Image: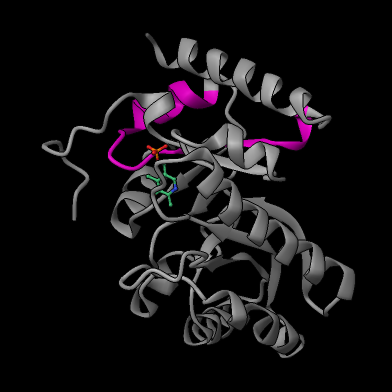
Amino acid sequence: MSIAENVAAIRQRINDAALSCGRDPKDILLCAATKMNDASAVRQAIAAGVDCCGENRVQELTAKLAENAYAGKPVHFIGHLQTNKVKQVVGKVDLIQSVDSVRLLEVIEREAERQGLTQEVLLEVNIGGEAGKSGFAKEEILPVVEKMASFSHIFVRGLMTVPPICQEVAESQEFFSEISTLSVDIRRKKYDNVSVDILSMGMSGDFETAIRCGSTMIRLGTAIFGPRDYTKSYQD
Ligand SMILES: *Cc1c(COP(=O)(O)O)cnc(C)c1O
């Protein structure tokens, strides 16, 4: 199947999942997780109508930006971001989805101020509390959003999560619902520099469940591009 055919099939599945729970399919954005896929594949995904692209590695982002691969659509950063690479990402992407520490927020704030812009971000939540996985613990989220008033060059658009790999739908549903509740809580309290209109959750294997739990942005790699070829370039 071509990328265009895959995207068309995914749109149908998004439609069905949204309608099955009384949601408007237009409220769910499709982010192409483009890691390990080259500029040509990215352009095909954009031509097929994905809403944005998400890149995991700074080196790949930089290379594909130089090739103008994302022309016409927003590009997001969705991988673990080291503080020493913040300069290469702030102002280059529309949204950093994977902010996982206060230290990283501080470094982004400083760089955004230096560039004279406001960087939009999502806070990544390690919803399963898994060791070795990045993200804030869910208990840390409220204290962090309370602090955002002092980050005048950052705007928090919402939350992002990669839940633990689950065998049962009911199990992932529990993680997705938990984070959905958390985002509703934050939205209700109204913090400065925080809006929480984006809930980024759901990947190729679980996006329909995520949609039923309130996801507004799904990040799909395999379902769009097929299995990743780890022998190819773009690895760092
Ligand atoms: C790779 C990746 C995805 C997409 O994963 P698939 O299972 O291939 O759809 C989504 N989010 C993040 C953060 C990723 O790194």
Ligand 1 placement by image quarter = top left
Q: For residue 42: magenta?
A: yes
Residue drawn at the location 48% of the way across and 74% of the way down: 100
Front-most of residues 128 and 37? 128
Span of residues in magenta: 25-46
Which residue is more in the foreground, 162 or 28? 162
Location of the C terminus by quadrant is: bottom left
Q: Position of residue 186 (x, y in %)?
A: 79, 71
In this rendering, position of residue 228 left or right of residue 196: left
State the image coordinates of residue 167 (x, y, percent, origin top left): 39, 41
Residue 114 at x, y = what percent?
A: 57, 82
Q: For residue 72, say whether it is visible.
A: no
On the image, which quarter does residue 150 sit in?
bottom right
- Decide if residue 35 is on the left or right side of residue 150: left
**Rendering quarter of residue 164:** bottom left
Query: Is residue 1 positioned above or below 121 on the image?
Result: above
